[in-house]
Amino acid sequence: MTLTFDEVLKRPKRDGSDKAVAELKSLLGDKVSTKPADLFSYSHDYWLITFHWLLKGKVPALPDAVVFPESEEDVVNAVQVAYENGVPIYPYGGGSGVLGATVPEYGGIVIDLKRLRDLRLYEDDLMVEAGAGVNGYYIEEYLNRKGYTLGHFPQSFYPSTVGGWVATKAIGQFSTKYGGIEDMVLGLRAVIPPGKLIELKPHPRTATGPDLRKLFVGSEGILGIVTKVWLKVRPYPEERYLLSFASESLEEALDSVRRILHRGARPAVVRIYDRVETKRHFYKFEELYGKIGTVMIVEGDSKLARAEKEIVEEEFKGVPTGEEPVRHWLETRFNVKEISEFAPVGVVIDTIEVAVNWSGAMNLYENVIRAMKSVKGTLMASAHASHFYDQGVCFYFTFAGVPPKGKSAEEFYNAVWDAAMRATLESGGTISHHHGIGRHRKRWLPEELGDAYEVLRRIKLAIDEKDVMNPGNMVV
Amino acid sequence: MPGKWDWLKDEIGLSNLLTGGRMLFKVIQGKLSVDDLTKCALCPNMCRHACPVSIIEGRETTSPAGKARVALMIREGRLELNLDNLEPLYTCLGCDLCSLYCPFEFSVADLIRPVKEKAVSKGVVFEEFREVFENLETSGDVCGKADSSADGSGRVLYFRGCTVRNERPELAEKTVEFLRKLGYDVFTVKETCCGLPAYNLGNTELFKKIAKKTADKLNATGAELIVTSCPSCAYAFRVLYPKHGINLKPRVLHVAELIGEVIPKLELRAEGTVTYHTPCKLAIHLGEKELLRGLLERVEGLEVKAPRRELFCCGHGGSAVSRLKPKLAEEIAAERREQLKDGATRVVTACPSCELALNGDGLEVIDIVEFLLEMMKK
């Protein structure tokens, strides 16, 4: 069952917390906090449900302590003590997740990794070594200064951390060229129960059994705590082209991008906006209004970028609308005001991202929009296609509504989500493209994974026998 | 040309417009909204990367939105108004780098100030700050040493400020020399603090009291122009005084702004490489982000290299962190030094506090006036 406010309040605390906290304090001193302001600060993430808690002044999910490790050894110590006492552990990076993955549902110990900030560039290897707590903007700034880029620009670029990207299998807006974080991870270190630091060394490629790095990528803290990663870097792009187009139909725009990718071009950025979202984001551009708008960025080595630009121009069926819409997108893409403005007055607004193969793309888009709109109280539902692959596309839906009379905000919210998830599954899509599972999406995960869900549960319990690593997250 | 929200009217059917949609449009029209502190509290910290405290301390509670949340909870009576809970609010440098990336252009320092003011009014004050308040009350100096200077007279008043007077008096001498070389009829007077430390620490009443006294003193000098080495003093005089109804008659310039007015005719030459640290008060609060670099680039033959990050606090801004958490202030300074070293090991700045905070550990930090005066003597 999806967490509701009342259900969280009823969760029993695990025994052993007081003893564990006392041990941690004697071991780690002032790196452990039990101050009310700190406990409150780690009680939520950016899951809409937790916003409602905040606005009501409720904090139903409080940790017992927060640990601020300054070294991997500190993380090992924290995990050891917690595990011995059977106390839950919740790793925390930038806290910018939107599905409750870091909410300390059973009380216990939050481990904030933001003080693990080591950085080292290996230029010959085109690789950077980063502590889990390094801030997104910080690592990019560090690399740019030396002539490189990670190419990873998630919407949460400013608030999020490297470790958080790996834990949630994050992806950025420039992913068509640079890939998601899973494409960038060469190696990692993590602390697993009962408090053992493991290292998966960075290699160009390795065929040494199942790829254990992938086990931790997207594990959302249920298996261990990522403390360090080695990531691929690229030379900073030599050339950049900004391109935008107006199309008459979403299908036409999608087909154009499919052809571009199938020819081997890799524009760094591709975004296709449906009519509603084109009006919403590009209302200042007359030639785009009422159309399907697409923005693209082609960048890289100047010869390669020029060749890719030619492919784009040959294959995209639509009216070119110049550089300005792309420039506008670049300037406004981190402007996230709506939730702060609408949530406090009772408007429910959220985003849902899914992925689907090309062959099912239009069908899924239509089905999900229809499903969300069919929920009483929904005022609008729209989408843009935000990430692209040779095989298909990610649709990023936005809905907004006001709960109908007699329904709480949470009931309405869950109803729209359920409609969208069911429509996605029925349309052959995957329930999450990049926001992950968290506490919110876990109710649909068994349906998504089918019999394989049991494999995930067994892996989880094999590594975390006592179920202390972010319990309640992802798996029931 | 469609407006920003026309798409929503298109999208919401008429029947919905009369029911749930009404609420949506009230928000859009600004008729239904929450206060700024709540908006900040609900934001996913889109300015975290800009906040030196957040980057270095790495603690959610003292992230920009984290501070807003704590302030909100205290304001709403859900967290007790005590020193433990106030500590995050005073873990703020007042640099306002957050405002540069804020979708609402908020200053977190401004948003949380009312809670600090309430705390001070109720006598909930850190011991480290009581001393500041007492010093300002008794001697008009943040360090507690009343100024014993004689009062001069003239057209241009050089206002030294507490930091220069107490910790960098040689900069005062050099600045007077520099201004006279530029042809200004410059003088100094016995000073009292601009009052900014009291304001930063939430004691707005004390700030206003000191500000009135200082303004009266400065007005009585008959000076046409006040020049200061301290961007915090310049900010207080130029922005905060008018905001609080305190009238200061002379025009106020930070010395770098004055240099900006005269540099075209100076024809300065130098060799070597420098980088620069633009103080937050100069960049954000006085709106002069490019000034310092611009001045340096006018020096013939000088190689000017940007630091790794254009703007970052020296760790000693805002009057609070350096007193309450000196270790954190020093860690922030150490981070800034690393960023500056990516540019050069010789750093030009325009704030005595920044200079003191950043000097050392392989960096030679020099005030813009000393740097230019060095050239003018050749």
Image (cartoon, coloured by chain):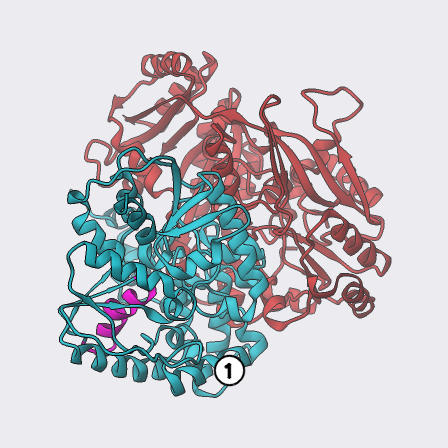
Q: Is residue A31 above or below residue A221?
A: below
Give the colour of chain A. red
Give the colour of chain B. cyan
Residue at the spot x=67%, y=60% of the render? A104
Residue at the spot x=76%, y=35% of the render? A199
Dot 1 crowding, Cα within 10 Å, few <14, some 14–19, many 20+: some
Q: Quadrant of residue A23?
A: bottom right
Question: Which element is circle 1 on?
Answer: loop
Residue at the spot x=66%, y=55% of the render? A1
Q: Is residue B19 visible?
A: no
Task: Name the residue tied to disc 1.
Answer: B125
Magenta stretch encompasses residue B203: no
Q: Where residue B332 sits: x, y (%)?
A: 52, 55
Magenta extent? B229-247
Q: Where residue A473 sits: x, y (%)?
A: 68, 51
Q: Is residue A284 above or below residue A317?
A: below
Residue at the spot x=22%, y=36% of the render? A285
Q: Tell me which amino acid carries mark 1.
A: Val
